[in-house]
Image (spheres, rainbow, N blue to C red):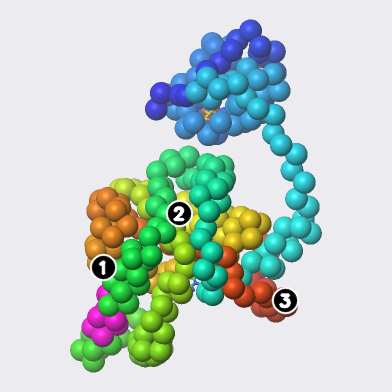
Amino acid sequence: MISPIHFIQDRCTDCGLCEADCPALAISISEAHISSDCIACGHCVAICPHAAMQFNGDEPHALPTQSVKADDFEALAKNVRSVRNFTDKDVSLEDIRHIVDMLAQCPSASNNRNVEITVVTDKNKIRDIERITSDTLYSFFKTLTRPIIKAVLSLFIAKKEVKKLDYYAQNFRIKRTRNKEFITYNAPAIILFHAPKLPIQSSSADAHIWATYTSLYAKTRGLGACFNGFIEQAAKRNKHIHSVCEINSTHEILCVLLLGHPAVKYTHEVSREKPKCTFV
Ligand SMILES: Cc1cc2nc3c(=O)[nH]c(=O)nc-3n(C[C@H](O)[C@H](O)[C@H](O)COP(=O)(O)O)c2cc1C
Ligand code: SF4
Ligand code: SF4
């Protein structure tokens, strides 16, 4: 790619920090050259003590002070819960603007950054997403739990897993009968992370990372979020979700978050088993 980095030679003291930190080995200070191997990560801008590297010609700003301590972050992680019960209050444009600005700082594989965000706040559209997702997954589970399909599946996956399908399907049917909004939970906003479908890409990882940052950040803004695998799975099987959300049909919907003001308050830590961790 053509590098967006502009090198101001007059400011350079030849310290070599940028060359040593460039993940693409794209910088030659001696030749005052940045090659097309540049992945536009901005590390040279971030590390140069003399602001001799500029991104798209912008004068670099000094970093704001990072004041989050380890204890603060652990407290945040403990405080974040999936929120499935929202007040009627809308998510403000200000909140969305801050989320989008924050996402510009998130990592992305090879710094590709091809994930896009669609925020749905129209109540009719949210109702449509609920209905299409529910109907699509209802049919999907119905097909998947047919005896002939289960017999074929048990040739490839463990019987225990096939049995789980019955449980999931039944659980889905029960939820669908009991609760009209068991997918979107009356959330005032739905954020869809999507990207063009390409043969080789890591957009799914990027989308999940961006959604995770969003869910943590949402908490700091007094909002609550919940990942929604149902909508993501339904969108793989029914393109109507794309049209309701006005998302290009060539894009893949990779991750979905419900967002709103929590109508619940959690007061206690959840005691969880620690992940298995091996030292080698
Ligand atoms: C990728 C992903 C998909 C999820 N999909 C759903 C979903 O469709 N509906 C839902 O109510 N919760 C969904 N969840 C939330 C999980 O159920 C939740 O994280 C888990 O129960 C732990 O609860 P906590 O987030 O409050 O700690 C999803 C979570 C992840 C990470
Ligand atoms: S933006 Fe990243 S890849 Fe490009 S020259 Fe700077 S450090 Fe290297
Ligand atoms: S970090 Fe800045 S001062 Fe040091 S070599 Fe790179 S451009 Fe020059």
Q: Looking at the picture, which amino acid does disc 2 mark?
A: Ala
- Identify which residue, 235 or 204, lies in the foreground: 235
In the image, residue 215 above or below residue 67? below
Q: Which residue is mark 1?
A: 237
**Tag 3–tag 2 contact (CB < 8 Å):** no
N-terminal-most mark, 3 or 2: 2
Q: Is residue 153 left or right of residue 72?
A: left
Is residue 230 among what the camera can see?
Answer: yes
In the image, residue 105 above or below residue 135? above
Label 2: state its secondary structure. helix
Label 3: state its secondary structure. loop
N-terminal-most mark, 2 or 1: 2
Q: Looking at the picture, which amino acid does disc 3 mark?
A: Thr
Segment tinted magenta in the rendering:
136-143
Residue 267: assigned label = 3
Residue 1: assigned label = none
Label 1: state its secondary structure. helix
Query: Residues under labels 2 and 1: Cα distance?
Result: 19 Å
Q: Which residue is mark 2?
A: 207
Q: Is residue 77 left or right of residue 72?
A: left
Q: Quadrant of the N terminus?
A: top left
Query: Residues under labels 1 and 3: Cα distance?
Result: 39 Å
Residue 175, percent across and down?
Answer: 41, 86
- Identify which residue, 119 or 79, lies in the foreground: 119
